[in-house]
Amino acid sequence: MTSAAADLSSSTGPHTRIDHFISMPAARADAWRGLTADARRWAAGKADRAAVERAFADIVVLEEFHAYPGARLMATLRDRLAAGSAEGFRNLAERVSQAVVTRSYKHDEGDWDVAESAADRMPDLGLPAHGSGGQHRPFFEMLLVSPHGGTRGAQQSAELRKLRRSEDAFIYETVPVGSFEDAICAAIMNPGIAAVTIYEGFDFASHHDAPVLRSVIAARGIDAADVDEGDLALGLASELKRLRPELDIYLLSDRKVESLAGHPQAGALRRVLYSVEEMLELHLSVLEGVAERFRTPFFDNLKHYATRPISTFHALPIARGKSVFKSDWIRDMGEFYGLNIFLAESSATTGGLDSLLEPTGNIKEAQEMAARAFGADRCFFVTNGTSTSNKMVHQAVVAPGEIVILDRNCHKSHHYGMVLGGAQPLYVEAFPMTEYSMYGAVPLASIKQALLDLKAEGRLDRVRMVDLTNCTFDGHIYNTRRVMEECLAIKPDLVFLWDEAWFGFARFSPVLRPRTAMGAAAAIEAWMHDPASVAAYETQQAELGENPSRETLLATRLIPDPRQIRLRVYQTNSTHKSMSSLRQGSMILVKDVDYHTVESQFREAVFTHASTSPNQQLIASLDIARRQMELEGYGLVMNAIEISLSIRREINSHPLISKYFKVLGAEEMVPASYRQSGFSDFLTPGTTWADQIRSMNEDEFCLDPTRMTLVCGTAGFDGTEFKKLLADDYDIQLNKTSRNSVLLQSNINNTRSDIAQLLRVLLDISNAIEKRLAEGGEAGRVAFFARVKSLMEDVPDLPDFSHFHDAFRGDAGEMTVEGDMRTAFFAAYDPAACEYVPLFGEECDRRLAEGPEMVSANFVIPYPPGFPIMVPGQVITHETIDFMRKLDVKEIHGFNREKGLRLIRIEAVTAKSAR
Ligand SMILES: Cc1ncc(COP(=O)(O)O)c(C=O)c1O
């Protein structure tokens, strides 16, 4: 087998690394390039046929799972190889290779033909890239699973091809396979597949060797010996849907289709058809299914709106563009942006448009489609970023005085949301990664501890929400299902807010999806309806006994009572951060059985925070981002992961670059105690896809491979300095930095050229360091290593949250540290109640030693690391001051360097409240 297919098929040998599995498209392109190189050598008499035969044998296996080049071109290649036609083989292999790499076969009919020139081509291949109106027709592939896959599938494919009409909006080719295992392989390997048709009667096992795939299928409890034909078809449909929920699946059966359609597993199917008579019906259904995902209700209407002659007598003079294009002075704005953006702007919510604040038409529909795509019950488009989405959820779900268990290291929108809404934060700490000046994620034990403390004090009813960031900025992914289950075991009606600002794309990766809020919520929902769950709960209750100790509860993986749980899950995502939405495009996803209890509050929250003039292009881009992810998200995310694995491997294995730089692997980002499965890293030799799935199922934290912490302190740069160097000198932009690292992020936009560029730049910088060290003499070397030591070793301890001052504890209990942050925040509005103490003065040291306690008047958030080291009402401790004094960053929000720390004068606040 090829290296690309091998990770699915072999658990030993050089091709077993997980990246080979995830790197399907790139590995496929490389395999074709390798074959053409061998073919060229053969044609030039520099190599014999055997090398070409070996390379071709590998490619044959891979191509079984793709529609292009298809059986005819592969057979021609095989014939030419067998006949010793080196020249003919090379010509065709080069053409096919080019088509595979550039994907031109999607629109160039000539790529499908054996003949070299258009004059010799067969007339009726029937793959016109353009439909009747001359419009471009997107191309997709349909997986066709049937008995005797190759032969019967080829006939069915030919029949389907005959049904093509010029008015079809899309064009597709089929990928015929004959077994359950091959169908799973094809769905994983081939991102071009957008629909699946299953005929009953196919085999279970592939004729290929596939032990890793088999172990994964077996771990899912699927056993060929157990299932009959019909169940196998439904079982395949369920498994495919689990891997790629966006796929439309059709089942063709010659049994009683009526009873099949009513089967409990039939939910995975889009349609059941009676196989003997339904070819045209199938063809039309397949096209309609894709059309349904393609449709973008708001964007489609906006485009239509832009074509109509409309006179506007309301605000927004820029709409229609007349004030721009008629101007002598700002016409370049029009030339730069183009006419459409002005034609598509309006402040109206009628005339084919809709209102974001109270949608009833195409925005409502677009939101419903997004909810479906992202696995939620409801979706709200937000045009002011996830900063606003988070505040909306806080306001809608939590009442003043209620407690929210909150990661102190979370984005500031949560902290501000609590100030505005008056909820009381009970901060829980993420595990520190002091050596890189960053935090990880919050251990489940800390969250359970907080809940158990509240329970012990009889105040559990006050907790409304657990609010966590998944994944974190640096890529720590929670075990969302386990967190929710264990918390629900302590309080069954808790609401969860998962800030997935960075993680929206994860829905479209089968490996990452179970760790998303909505992926986990779906799993919990299914578990709740499984009769075995009540038994599992009762068994555990019996084992725990009447009054289990806190230690026992902390040490036990708690099972909630499925009859008691109220599943209430909210997710926010910055669609603009990981998908094709314009900046500030964000979504709130809701799966809340008790949504009706907060519905009116939710509307108020939207009214409070949303602009009454939302940007039409932003809304349209959210609609479009959904379309894209449903139709090609799987492949795009696969590509983003593949790029990141490539970057990780290339940097860490390059002989020179790796002397100065390193991308931290999972084993460095996640302490071993949180990697219970024993998973070490994606690139550890011998790691397979099955290992990664086990890690995703079992480990407390996993690492999102697309978020790469690149250590630059070892090259003598602090994060901010290195970020600036990359931006100023090399036009490479990145986002977050720490004292000794920068964060690189791969996304659906990146290409292999980006990897090459990054490596070239790192090599350039490494060479410059080498040169400096070689030419700088002993003093230069000493200075360099001293700088490296300082960046890598003299790292300040990260300060934990201390506690709120008693004046801002509200009615908090003894054991927990929540506080009334809102009162502290607004107390500081009175200048007489505030004072300043210089950070580096004696006064500060004296106050720390002798009091009175220093209490922060506001949030103080240094960038990096970007979390609030002080919040309003927090008592400032030695640890915080030490950290601040060692901070060497320029940007510290909430801190005035000239005046010093802004503090609340407690005596003024208490005197005022006594009045
Ligand atoms: C975890 C997290 N949540 C929310 C936000 C805010 O998102 P937005 O920029 O879409 O407002 C950010 C921004 O970086 C973030 O990192």
Image (cartoon, grey):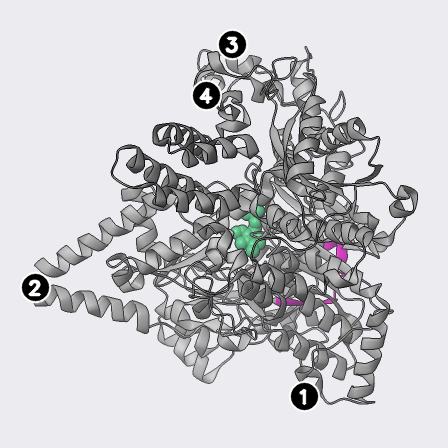
Q: CA distance from mark 3 to mark 1?
A: 75 Å
Q: CA distance from mark 4 to mark 3?
A: 15 Å
- Residue stretch rendered in magenta on the structure: 395-406
What number is the disc on residue 326? 3
Picture coordinates of residue 710, whole percent (x, y): 37, 58
Query: Which residue bears the numbered disc 4?
Result: 336
Picture coordinates of residue 325, whole percent (x, y): 51, 12
Q: CA distance from mark 4 to mark 1?
A: 65 Å
Kind of residue indicated by mark 3: Lys
Left or right for 276, reference 59 = right
Q: Does the magenta portion include 656?
A: no
What number is the disc on residue 567? none
Q: Does the magenta portion include 402?
A: yes
| Secondary structure category for the residue under label 1 | helix
* Foreground label between 4 and 1: 1
Query: Which residue bears the numbered disc 2?
Result: 777
Left or right for 460, reference 637 = right
Q: Are marks 3 and 2 in contact (CB under 8 Å)?
A: no
* Foreground label between 4 and 3: 4
Looking at the image, tell me whether mark 3 or mark 2 is earlier in sequence order: 3
Vertical relation: 208 (above or below) 575: below
Residue 888 visible in the picture: yes
Closest to the observer, 31 or 630: 31
Kind of residue indicated by mark 4: Phe
Residue at x-position 56% and y-position 68%: 701
Q: CA distance from mark 2 to mark 1?
A: 59 Å
Picture coordinates of residue 723, whole percent (x, y): 34, 51
Closest to the observer, 804 or 346: 346
